[in-house]
Amino acid sequence: MIKRFFQYYKPHRKLFFADLFCAFLLSLCDLFYPMITRSMLNDYIPNRKLRILVLWGLILCVIYLVKMGLKYFIQYYGHLVGIRMQADMRKEAFDHIEKLPFTYFDNNKTGAIMSRIVGDLQEIAELAHHGPEDLIVSCFLLVGSFILMSTINIWLTLIIFAFLPFLIWFAARKRLKMSEAFTKSREEVADVNATLENSIAGIRVAKAFENSEYESRKFQKHNLLFLEARGKSYRAMAEFFSGNGFIIDVLNVVILIAGGIFTYKGWIDYADFASFIIFVNIFMTPIRNLINLIEQLQNGMSGFTRFCELMDTPVEQDAEDAKELTDVKGKIDFNHVSFSYGDSEKEVLHGVDLHIEPGQTVALVGPSGAGKTTMCHILPRFYEIKDGEILVDGEDIRGVTRSSLRRHIGIVTQDVFLFTGTVYENIAYGKEGATEEEVIAAAKRANIHEFIEALPDGYQTFVGERGVKLSGGQKQRISIARVFLKDPAILILDEATSALDNATEIMIKKSLDQLCRGRTTLVVAHRLSTVRNADEIVVITEDGIRERGSHESLLEENGMYADLYRSQFAQA
């Protein structure tokens, strides 16, 4: 784990080593004062060497000016090392998240994921800066103090340093308890963030149902769990610091008693005793730094552990010999396809066979939960099938790269997602590097250009978070324009108009009809009136494909499709 952590220093090693060198010089500066004090008390003041006394005073001022510059460098550039490492980790984590399979997001809350790449990495940045620096300074000051104190009196020095093993033993004993407490605390913070993110995202639903008190109770439940976990971590921290503080306070008493006895016996003089006390204060500084380092280590490494858990989550992998899918015509074959979600033994699809010719429109209808949307998800390999094979133009989709497969598939869903940004940015998302002319042409084909032009800032109008400033029909047409810009050979329409009113649906349908022209299209719909003109209608149930054929032939069969159609027509 430590070795893996230090790998992130490599891109910034020059600045990192400069920071450590400055920390080393800073600790060297701190050792000057007690040595000069000893010389002043033993020699310059008793022997009235005023000129040398003033000279060393000036030298000390120069040393402290240098010390000020060193502290500035450490505080500024040392923190830069930490935040640059943090930025590297955050970029690496984001890139990794983009490659994770859908199953990861099915099983993990958005707020919890955000907590790993925001909150956890902040603690890691602090450890990255202060950890090695405090360790280097503390070790040098301890060694330097021991050597210089030994020149005054070796036995008094050994008495003081004999307390170090007790400090180390106590810190090591409490370290594990702190680590467990802080890890649990981070998990609860992630849950609080997830609940908060979910509640804010659903604020309109909460208001519509007057459920603010319920949301408050739900949030408070996780908030209290966080409070309990945080309290345990602070209890462990309190035990750690109070215990170490007590040992250090006892050490101060020992210094006074032992130093007093040594002075009384004449083994050291008053000047050496005064210098010794100053040295001990310097000796205390690295001890406190090492104690603080252990706290930082707990915070930072627990965060880094959670970061590593995220980074070690397997990403979507293409086959070693995967090739690019090019010049797609749009022929699709489902051959004996079976699928189940996760580790569930229940199969959503079992032995499905479906063959779609290039340019053909096939509609999937049937009851909810029969697997219609699942078929739309496994075609672009959002999920991996259990058995069978799916072919595109005769190529098994597991033998081609995911990026090339998805590049040729356009998806329009019921729940349109628009990114926070402008109308232009959301349409241009369909094709990286698209020109303004291409974006406008796509908007025109989606029948939304005139509406966009009428907006206050035209194409540069901000749509709000998730497109909240636009109606459902307007968001849908922007998503259609996005697919027009992408220009895929295969199109998936998953309940694309089911959330719209009849008037808006008719308007959107014109855009969709144009979008479907010349493309292989897979349509999922509950409103059977929207799929009457499909080349083939496939009725899917939990038992698999029940019926298939054109609208007219299925009505003539007077089976399940006919019953569904008549019931919807009667309701209309």
Image (tube, helix red, strand yellow):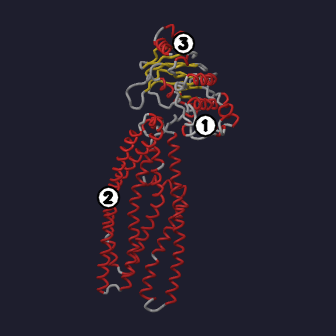
Viewer-closest of 188 and 571: 571
Please provide percent x and percent y for residue 46: 43, 91
Looking at the image, is mark 3 or mark 1 earlier in the sequence?
Answer: 1
Q: Is residue 542 above or below residue 439?
A: above
Looking at the image, is mark 1 or mark 2 earlier in the sequence?
Answer: 2
**The quadrant where residue 147 appears:** bottom left
Please provide percent x and percent y for residue 99: 51, 39
Q: Which residue is mark 2?
A: 174
The reply to whether residue 442 is visible in this rendering is no
User: Which amino acid type is shown beneath numbered disc 3?
Assistant: His
Instruction: Name the residue rendered at 31%, 87% in the picture.
Output: 266
Q: In whole angstroms, how far apart are the C-alphas of marks 3 and 1?
A: 36 Å
Please provide percent x and percent y for residue 1: 42, 52
Q: Which residue is mark 3?
A: 551
Of badges 2 and 3, nearer the viewer stands 3
Q: Secondary structure at mark 3?
A: helix
Q: Which residue is mark 1?
A: 426
Viewer-closest of 543 and 436: 436
User: Which amino acid type is shown beneath numbered disc 1?
Assistant: Asn
